[in-house]
Image (tube, grey):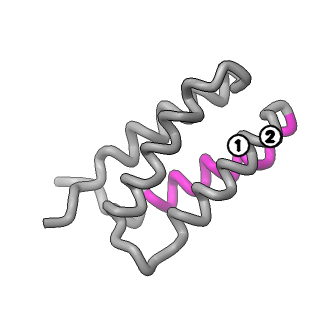
Amino acid sequence: MPPNPNEVIRQCIGVLDRIINDDSVPRNIRRNAESMKNTLSNEKDSPSTRAAMVVSRLDDIGNDPNVPLHTRTLIWGLSSQLETIPVDR
């Protein structure tokens, strides 16, 4: 059974909150996480659209050399979770 897209998004927002509140994460990364959280929370778009927009931004952040290793691991996990959301037909 495929995962519930809204549940996946809710879990991802929780992980983004952890990144946003982590003082060891550079400020620009925390700002990006806040922006991604807002994108995921915007219910005007479909879950797959919101997930796709955030995954592309997570890829950019994941390659930033200033991201702490523990945060990079969270980012990769977020990306993997969001990729489980089926694309709208």
> What stretch of residues is rendered in magenta?
9-23
Q: Residue at x 59, y 34 (%)?
A: 61
Query: Residue 11, relative to residue 68: is it above or below?
Result: below
The crowd level at tag 1 (other Cα within 10 Å; few <14, some 14-19, many 20+) is many
82 relative position to 3: left or right: right
Query: Residue 44, relative to residue 22: is it above or below?
Result: below
Q: Position of residue 88 (x, y in %)?
A: 20, 65
Query: Residue 87, relative to residue 71: is it above or below?
Result: below
Q: Residue at x 86, y 38 (%)?
A: 23
For the residue pair 44 and 3, the one nearer the viewer reads as 44
For the residue pair 73 and 65, the one nearer the viewer reads as 65
What residue did someone put label 1 on?
A: 19
Q: Secondary structure at mark 2?
A: loop
Q: Residue furthest right?
A: 23
For the residue pair 3 and 61, the one nearer the viewer reads as 61
Q: Position of residue 27 (x, y in %)?
A: 82, 41
Q: Residue furthest left?
A: 89
Q: Is residue 52 magenta?
A: no
- Give the prevailing secondary structure in the magenta stretch: helix
Quarter of the picture containing the N terminus is bottom left
Q: Secondary structure at mark 1?
A: helix
Q: Are marks 2 and 1 in contact (CB under 8 Å)?
A: yes
The amino acid type, in three-letter code, at marker 1 is Ile
What residue did someone put label 2 on?
A: 22
For the residue pair 53 and 73, the one nearer the viewer reads as 53
